Image (tube, rainbow, N blue to C red):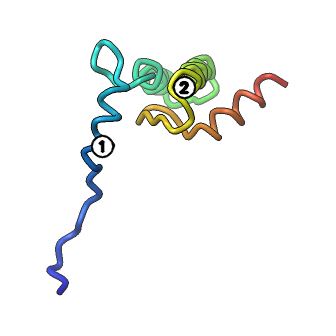
Amino acid sequence: MYSGTTTWYRPTDRTQNMDNRRRSAEGQPPCKAQACAIQACLKRTGYEEGRCAAAVEALYTCCAQFYEREGRDARSVCCPAPDVVAARRQEVDK
């Protein structure tokens, strides 16, 4: 019977434990500093993406290192999917 309420996705305990294990020493998700640097840059530059290319590249570099270290099944809320990161790295290396 439909009660009219919305059911939100809730990660399993296993998923939460995996995410917690992968947090940095400061208790932050991997690559959070780089993701926040992008947001700060966008805000500072009036959301001119081109002026934040170095910050974006730093995030992709961090995420690539994260996936190399933790494996392709690893997840961070701050990183795109491993395939996206790999494609971006190949594009930059051309």
* Label 1: few (<14), some (14–19) or many (≥20) C-alpha neighbours in 10 Å: few
**Above or below, comparing residue 61 to residue 75 in the picture:** above
Element marked by disc 1: helix
| Image quadrant in which you'd find residue 67 | top right
Dots 2, 1 in contact, CB < 8 A: no
- In this view, the residue in front, 71 or 75, is 71
| Image quadrant in which you'd find residue 44 | top left
The disc labelled 1 sits on which kind of residue?
Arg
- Going 71% across and 27% down the picture, which residue do you hit? 89
Q: Quadrant of the N terminus?
A: bottom left
Let me know if residue 44 appears in the view: no
The disc labelled 2 sits on which kind of residue?
Cys
Residue underneath mark 1 = 14
| Image quadrant in which you'd find residue 16 | top left
- Going 32% across and 26% down the picture, which residue do you hit? 21
Disc assigned to residue 55: none
Residue at the right extreme of this rendering: 94
Let me know if residue 45 appears in the view: yes
Q: Horizontal and vertical percent for residue 39?
A: 44, 27
- Going 51% across and 31% down the picture, which residue do you hit? 47
Q: Horizontal and vertical percent for residue 37?
A: 45, 19
User: Spatial distance from mark 2 to mark 1, Cα to Cα?
Assistant: 22 Å
- Going 49% across and 28% down the picture, which residue do you hit? 46
**Side of 85 relative to 6 (left or right):** right
Residue at the top extreme of this rendering: 25
* Label 2: few (<14), some (14–19) or many (≥20) C-alpha neighbours in 10 Å: many
- In this view, the residue in front, 34 or 17, is 17
Q: Horizontal and vertical percent for residue 32?
A: 40, 23
Residue underneath mark 2 = 63
Query: Between disc 2 and disc 1, whose residue precedes?
Result: 1
- In this view, the residue in front, 31 or 72, is 72
